[in-house]
Structures are given as structure tokens and as C-alpha cells.
Amino acid sequence: MNKTAAVIGGGFAGVEAAVQLARAGVHVDLYEMKPHRFSPAHSSENLAELVCSNSFKAERLASAAGLLKTEMERLGSLCVECAKKTKVPAGGALAVDRDLFSAMVTQRIEQTENITVIRREVSALPQADCVIIAAGPLASDALSPVLNELCGEGLHFFDAAAPIVSADSIDPAFSFAQSRYDRGGEDDYINCPMNKEEYEVFYEALITAEGAHLHEVDKKKDVYEGCMPIEVLAKRGKDAIRYGPMKPVGLIDPNTGHRPWAVLQLRKENAQGTLYNLVGFQTNLKFGEQQRVFSMIPALKNAKFERFGVMHRNTFIDSPRLLNSAFQLKKHPHIFFAGQITGVEGYMESAASGLLAGLNAARFLSGKSPLVLPAQTMLGALSAYIADESVKNFQPMGAAMGLLPPGQEKIRDRAARYEKLSLRSLEALDSLIAEERI
């Protein structure tokens, strides 16, 4: 194929995208600004640098993280291959020697035919038949004007997200569906009522819970403008959140016939209704504290948290408005985005999005239609989420079993249910791989 591509960013998404394009016979210029410039989170010259944990989460197939890595491996992932060759003991997780991993990825990229690594900061879109922007969550100042021009108001600079729980883990005995004053669809919200005693116990736990450490880059004042953490609001007074996100006005609990003392509302996070967002509960509590404190709400006592709340510096685009599920910019089909800048969250999620963007960029250059992965697959569900226009207040999401459409068979045991969903996913993916000859 006598075509050229430019990939901006040598992180997990960028290297996966470059490899997929190179394998399709496309010449790729991979732009990486290190070592001439480092983001606040980076220190190594190597590609695919790990900046936080050295874990890629669970290996077991019957888990969201394990399923995603298995799918990626079947699609020819470089990162999964290198991770397995540099793994260190970590129980049931796939963890790596971070320096060996990044060094191996860098060596493989530099030795791959059709890939040229260009070490400089990008301030304008390179001349190429297609471009993949995989700039990560800390895009450089020089690249930001380019992103602003492409995305306009669809570019966000701070991530202030509330937790998300799976629908099937919300206890129906302690919740009810109703819109405030019966305005809107009756299933628009699931309400989690609390009486006075339950609320006061929850309130004390909330205001004394331990917050997460903030990096210097996250301590700027404008991180919290318009999105105050629930625990900060609560410290203004015992009734502050009862008059805020937990106000019970306009709601009647059918179990009591009365207005609750306080109510947490859950709003659909996706069109399938398999995920629900804790409305108004953006938070900077540690993940373990979120699990402990929010599970004190009766309806969430057995909740499966598919994503915890976060508040930190994070450049990402409003993907449902800007991208299709191929990670392709709707207004400029020759431009693709990949990685955390699209709203996927996590090392392997970023790599997976780069892999799919690379596959689809190659298909675009050869005149083929985009590859749409089955919704039953984890990567297919994740890419559908970032392109789901029904998602309100779009926020980053990692791999989660709650993204998958439920199976036809009702299985009460969670582990058995997840195993069944995972096997269904691989069967669908294998059929597509055979059909498309990937």
C-alpha cells in the first residue's frame, strides 16, 4: 500500500496504532516529543512509559480487564505480548517490570519495518494520508491549539467524574424508579432513599473519609470550578447535600408513601441501561473509601462499582459528539483519535483503542468500511460507549463487565455470569476475525 500515516504520541495507544498500520503496509511516522520535552507525569525516554501502577489489572478471563487483554492478544497487540514477556509476580494480576516493558516496546517499534520514530513536539497536523492523535491525557501546550481547532467546545481539560455502578447490582428492595415531580420517563432515574438515621450515619462517614492524593498538576484552582466534590460540599453543614444532590423534593417512596429524608439519584449512563451514574457525586475520595462509604446507602449495599469517581487533570474530547465507534473524527474522516484523550481509561484500554484506531485507519486508506466489533466483546462495548450519543455528561470509562449487553440466560452467581459473558465475547470475536481475515 503506497500510503502514509502520522501517529502523534508514543504512549500505549500510539505504539499499537503504529504497529497495526505498519502491518497493513502503510508507512508510519510516529511522533514522540520525549526526550526534548516531558509532560509533568513522564521521566523516561522510552515509548509506552508507565506513569502510575505497574499493573495491567486482572488476568482471569472472567473479568473485564482479563477479557480485554485476551481480545487484544487475538487482534495482535504489541503491548499484551511485551507485558507477558516482562511480567513480575502479582497474584492474579498481570504486572510488569516497568523499565523492561517500556524498553522492549521501544525496541520492537524501532525495529518494525514501515515505522519511523520522529522525536519532536508536534504543533501542527503532519502531512499524511491519515493522522492518528494519541496525545494522552496531558497533551502538550503546542498541540492544544490544534485540538481546540478540531474539537472546539468538545475538548475538556479536567476530569470530574462520579462513580458508576452496574444496574444488576442495585438492590430493588431499597430503590424505586421515578423522575422528580414525575417529569420525564419513569425509568430515567433510580432513586435510593435514606431515612434520617441512615443519612446521618452516611454523612459522618462521608465527611471523615480519606481523600486521594493530588499531584501538583491537579492542584490548580480551576480543577473544581462548577464540580465540587460531594465530600467538600457535605462539610459545609449536615443538610448541605440534602439541599443539593441528595434533595428528596418531588419524590415519593412507594414503600412508605412519604418523601424520603434524603435521596441519591442514579441516572442511566448508557443506552442499554446496564450502567448507572451516581448523580452529583463527583468525588476525590480514595477508591476504597468510595466503596466503603457509598455502599452504606441501602440500595448500594452490594453495588458493583464499574468506575470510581475521579477529579484530576485530564485532557479528553467529547467523543460521543465527535467520533464514531471506529475512533474516527466524524467531520474529518482521515483523522482518528486514540488513547485516554478519547475517554477510555487505563493502560490497556488506551492500547486497545489505539489498536482499533490503527486497524480502522488502515481500512480507511485501503477504501474499506470501518471495522465495527460486536457489542458482546469488551473492546466493541468500550468503543460503542465512547460513540454513544445518549451518554449524558460524557466522562472517561475503563473496561467494565457492565458495558456488555446482558446474556439471555439469567445467572445469579456473578463469577459464573461473567465467565459466560466472556466466552460469548471470544466466540463473537473469533467469528469476526475469521470473516474479516484479520
Image (cartoon, rainbow, N blue to C red):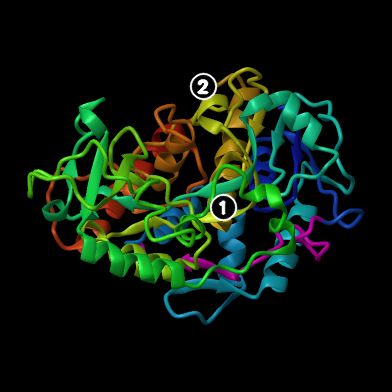
Task: Give the percent coordinates (x, y) of residue 284.
Answer: 53, 60
Task: Give the percent coordinates (x, y) of residue 100.
Answer: 71, 72
Name the quadrant containing residue 252.
top left
| Mark number, residue 369 | 2
| Mark number, residue 77 | 1
Based on the picture, tell me whether residue 51 belongs to the magenta stretch: yes
Helix, strand or loop: magenta stretch = loop
**SS at circle 1:** loop
Q: Is residue 285 above or below residue 159?
A: below
Residue at horizontal 48 percent and vertical 36 percent from the top: 393
Amino acid type indicated by mark 2: Ser
Task: Give the percent coordinates (x, y) of residue 149.
Answer: 75, 24
Residue at horizontal 77 percent and vertical 61 percent from the top: 42
Query: Gap between marks 1 and 2, in whole Å?
Result: 22 Å
Residue at horizontal 41 percent and vertical 65 percent from the top: 290
Q: Which quadrant is home to the N terminus?
A: top right
Depth check, front residue: 406 or 156: 156
Graded by Cα atoms within 10 Å as few (under 14), some (14 to 19) or many (20 or more), the crowding at tag 2 reads: few
Q: Which residues are magenta?
A: 39-61
Q: Is residue 302 at least partly visible in the picture?
A: no
Amino acid type indicated by mark 1: Ser
Name the quadrant containing residue 356.
top right
